[in-house]
Structures are given as structure tokens and as C-alpha cells.
Image (cartoon, rainbow, N blue to C red):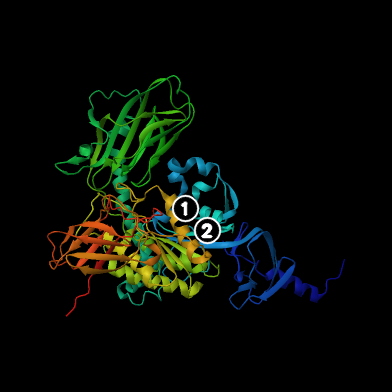
Amino acid sequence: MKHITPLFIFFFLSAASLAEVRLPQLVSNNLMLQRDAPAVLWGWASPGEAVGLTFRKRAYQTVADSSGSWEIRLPPQKSGGPHTLTIRASNTITISNVLFGDVWLCSGQSNMETPISRVMTLFGDEIRAYANPHIRYAKIPLAYSFHAPQADVPPCSWVEVTPETAPGFSAVAYFFAREMYEATGVPVGIINSSVGGSPAEAWLSEAALQPFPAMLNDVRMCRSDEFVADMQRLGALPGRRWHEVLGEQDRGLREQWASPAYDDRAWSATNLLNSSWGKSDGRPANGAYWFRREVDVPAGYAGQPATLYMGRIVNADETFVNGKSVGTTTYQYPPRIYPLPAGTLREGKNLIAVRVVSSGGFAEFVPDKPYKIAFADGEIPLTGEWKYRAGALMPPAPGGGMAFQNKPAGLYNAMIAPLRNHAVKGVLWYQGESNTGRAAEYYRLMAALMGDWRSAWGADLPFFIVQLANFMAPALLQQHSGWAALRDVQRRLTEDVPHAALAVTIDLGEWNDIHPLNKKDVGKRLALQAQKMLYGKSIVSEGPRYRSCERSGNKIIVSFRDDANDLLPVDELKGFAIAGADGVFRLAKAAIDGQKVAVWHDEVSHPTAVRYAWADNPDGANLRNRSGLPASPFQGELRIEN
């Protein structure tokens, strides 16, 4: 028997007791690191354990601290790759296909989160034809914490852009990345840390929330894990019970109203886009409603794959073709786009049935959306008359309890703080819908957020902010508009705070959709601002930007910034309003005069203030520059001289 010395046993046991070295989620295959900046590689091991890293034939070493954390800094690298990183401690980890380029942190709420899969109807052909290994993407999963900044994010990984992976990408970030790569040739990395419905305060650290004492106390309330768990459990009970009773009482489920064999001759008829079916005495009628329609499919289309478009539905739906469920959506915002595999449709009569669940508010099939069956070379429209019947009527669904992901500091701690070691080129921010109605506070919140994040990534960290798009009923002027007021705050922020720029999207929205589909132009406009600010390109990156106003007789003369005042002539300039001493704004006449705009109203002899595009959806406002970029909405007031 071979003799084992006590010294060998000591080393063997010591090595066996060492914890395996661990890496954060974003240090993984396909990793994208920021070029021309020190790159931090970090992770965890046993306290005092030696950790080594090999990169481009050079070795780097460090020792884990008393908590087991370690980091190694690589010197700045030029763009390019792919490279391999090897990390060794008690175990060895190899990170392959590493690129250096420009990394962008994308954050905000649902319009940043909206994936490519939602916009395929507009851009599907180009997305299916595009692959680029020099564009990488990582989506941070939803997480929140009220205790402290977390060490790592939930499981995620980097992926390259391919037709197969693209549907999961943020649409804004995807088109931004493509524009940036085509313009610069530099690899692009996107870290998407965004959450639908999130307000700005959820993305601030507790330290940055010090000027907001009520929000700080909200954090303190949520610091009790027992409170959070109880509220989540209890908050889900009423809604779950509502759906249980609805399912038990819905005649459509019991009697199989989705079946082609069901006799619906006694049902009422309605135009699909006439929402009167969802009302009772002028009030919302909640519950389950069923809609049926027979569609004749010509022989040439029978058996072919197709796509069923059912617009948007308030609130939820399950849709059936010939008795088979082809898709379901649980809330109102996503477009209903349901694939119909080959063989789903047959020649002649085909039955489409839709179960609509209305839980609160007025149920409807949203107008100005596509309702059709689309084939490769044709389509069958689905608007017009349908048969319908209520399956079960219900009271409004009870509230869903607290949305803890929207509480102050929670998203920062779990989805921003763990990223601080990862150097980034800049921030793309698309958020504000959840803060409309709090414009003055939003200015302070966003100024605090920008300073907060710059404390982690550098004082000159650039912010590129998407201004809220037009939304809701069209109107050239509203006396009070929460959306217009917040847009003006976004404009002023990017003027007051250094290293910030605005992408104006007042012409890219949809009146009936808070998530407009044209994310391609949003990405382009962000890319124009980034190219001008950070890459020294001599380009026009934005539309006319308000600078000042002055009175001349009964007119207000509006001036614009020198780099954005090449105004595009139009036959009739629309969207301007003027106010006198009474403070009431009136739609006004306006005319371009060289590089300025004169605004007047025949009944306002002594104007004091001017507005442009001041409405939730200022449809028709048409001030642009010769590059075709729209002017930002604004409000300007004259100085009151004593």
C-alpha cells in the first residue's frame, strides 16, 4: 500500500474544501465588453483563494477577499474579437466568443421592453433576413429587492443576432444596434434591463431617494419579507377567485360554443368594432363574451399556413379555429397575431370563435387594427358582422394587490446595481408613461436617477432619452395634458443635464396603442443622437429645438437652437397655441419667418405664453426641419417686466 504523507493529505483536503469559482451571469459565452475602457472581470471564490485569468497570452492574478469576492481588471482593448478568457482557481472556466465593442444599457418600461416579435408585421422580411455576430444582446429577467443592492442578476446570457434570436430582442434596442453598427462598424452590445409599467422611482437607489421621504418610507415598508409575501398571496386571491367563478359559470365553456357543431342561430349580431355589446346601461358589463363567425376559404387557400390577426382586444381572449384553440392573450396590450399551421383551414366553411374576458373597464375590439386571415398571396377580412352572446356576467374583477416591482428602489437593487462592474458606452432610456400626471416630480426623479447611475458608471455617462410618443384621442390642443407636460420635462432635462439628448417621437405613436409598432424609427433617432454626440459625426440628429421666445406687437416670435433651426416650409403650420393674461391657450396662426416662427391670434392682443403640440396626441402638428425630423413639443413664457 502506497504511503500518503500528512502534508499531501493537508493539501488534498484544503483543495477539496475550496468553493468553485463562480462568475456573474453576464460573464458568459458571447460576452461583449466595452472597448477602450478598463474591463472588469469579477466573481466569487473561497475567501483568500487565488484566482487567475488568461487573456491574449497574458496572465492576471488576484486573491478573493474576506467575503469571497474578487475582480481582475484588463487594460483597455480595441474593438474586435472573438477572444477567449480562461479563469482558474480550484476549477477552470473558459469564456469563448468574447467581443470588444460599444455596450449600451437599455432601460425603462414596456416600450423599451417591447420585443421584435410584436413588430414582425411591419418589419418581418428584413428581420428574417438579418444576422450579425457583431451585435450581442442580454435581457435581464425581472427581479426586485428592498434590502440592499444585489450581487448578481437572475440567470441570463448573451446571444448573437440571428433571425431565430431576434424575436426576443427589445425592438428599440435591435434597430438602434443595427443603425449603430452600420454607421460605425463597431460591435454593439445591448444590456436590456427594463420592466413594463415601471415608474422612474423603481430605478433609483435608496441613497438617491433621500429627497423623496414618502418613497423612502415605501421602501421601508417593503423591507419586511413577511409583508411582501402576505400581500402577494392575499393580493392574488380575489382575482384568482374571480376567474374560478367565471370559469364555473361560463355557459360557453360548458356548452362548447367554440365548436363548429354548436347552433348559434339564436345569438345576436353585431359589427365587430361596435363596442355596445360590452356595456349595460352605459356602464361596463364584465364577464365572458363569445363571438363566432363563419369564413369561406377558397380552394386555393385551403390547407395553406396562414396568420390570424385579431387586432387588439380589451381585456383578454382565447381564439379558436374550427374548434381548436390557436392562441390566447391574458391582457389588452399585445396585438393578437396567431399563426395557423398548414391544415388548420379547410376549403369552404371555417368557424372562428373568440372568447373575450372583460375584467374591468369597457370591453372592445380596438378599432384601426388589422382583423384578417393573411396568406402568402392574399387575405380574408374579418371586420363586419359577427354573432355574439354573453357566457357569464361578473362584477368588476377586484384589484390585483400591490405591484412590488413598481415600488421605489426595488428594480435598482436587483437589475441595475449588479451591472455596475460592466462598463457601458451610454444609456438608452424609454420611460415616463407611468409617471404622467407627476411631471414636476418627474424632473427631480430623473435628475436624481441620472446622477445616481453616473456615480456608478462615470460623471459623463451619456443618456439618450426617448420622448413619449403621441397617444389617445387626437387633438391639436389641450389646456391640461399630462403627456404633454411630461414631454416638456423630458425636453428640459436633456437641455439642463450635460451629456443628454432627446429622441422625439411625437409622430411615431398610435392613437389606440400605448405600444406603437414603429420602433425602427425610434432606434434610428436614438442612433442619430448617439452618432453626433459620441462619434463626432457632422449630421443633423434632431428636429427644431425650442430656445426662447419674445413678443413683437401681438405676436410671439419663437427662436430655435442654431443647430436645429433649418425649418421646413409648409403651406399651413399647425400645432401652435397662444395665451394672454387670462392664461387660456387658443389655437393660433403661425408662420415660418426665416429661422424663427411667428405665432399670433387675432383675439389675443398682448400674448404672454406659447405652446407647440400641447396635447396627448397632437395629431397634425407639423413643424419639422429639412431633414424631416419633428420638433419637440414645448411651452415658452415671456419674461414679466416690472
Whether residue 238 is situated above or below residue 321 in the rendered picture: below
Residues 555 and 588: in front is 555
Residue 326 at x, y = what percent?
A: 42, 34
- Distance (Cα) linking label 1 and label 2: 9 Å
Give residue 177's position: percent from left, percent from top. 52, 55
Q: Nearer the viewer, residue 515 or 546?
A: 546
Q: Which residue is mark 1?
A: 170
26 left or right, relative to 472? right
Which residue is located at x 30 percent, y 73 percent? 214
Q: From the viewer's perspective, is residue 206 above or below residue 510? A: below
Residue 603 screen position, x and y as percent: 12, 60
Q: Earlier in the sequence, mark 1 or mark 2?
A: 1
Q: Is residue 495 visible?
A: yes
Amino acid type at mark 2: Ile
Which image quadrant: the N terminus?
A: bottom right
- Mark 2 Cα shell of 10 Å, populated few (<14), some (14-19), many (≥20): many
Q: Who's the residue at 25% across and 38% down the image?
A: 392
Report the residue that reaches farthest toward the bottom: 642
Residue 414 in the image, given as x and y percentages of width and height: 46, 65
Q: Amino acid at mark 1?
A: Ser
Q: Quadrant of residue 60?
A: bottom right
Q: Nearer the viewer, residue 127 or 170?
A: 127
In depth, the one of 365 and 423 nearer the eye is 423
Q: How many marks?
A: 2
For residue 344, which quarter of the picture?
top left
Element under label 1?
Answer: loop
Q: Residue furthest front?
A: 594
Check disc 2 and report the residue beneath it. Answer: 190
- Disc 1 to disc 2: CB gap under 8 Å: yes
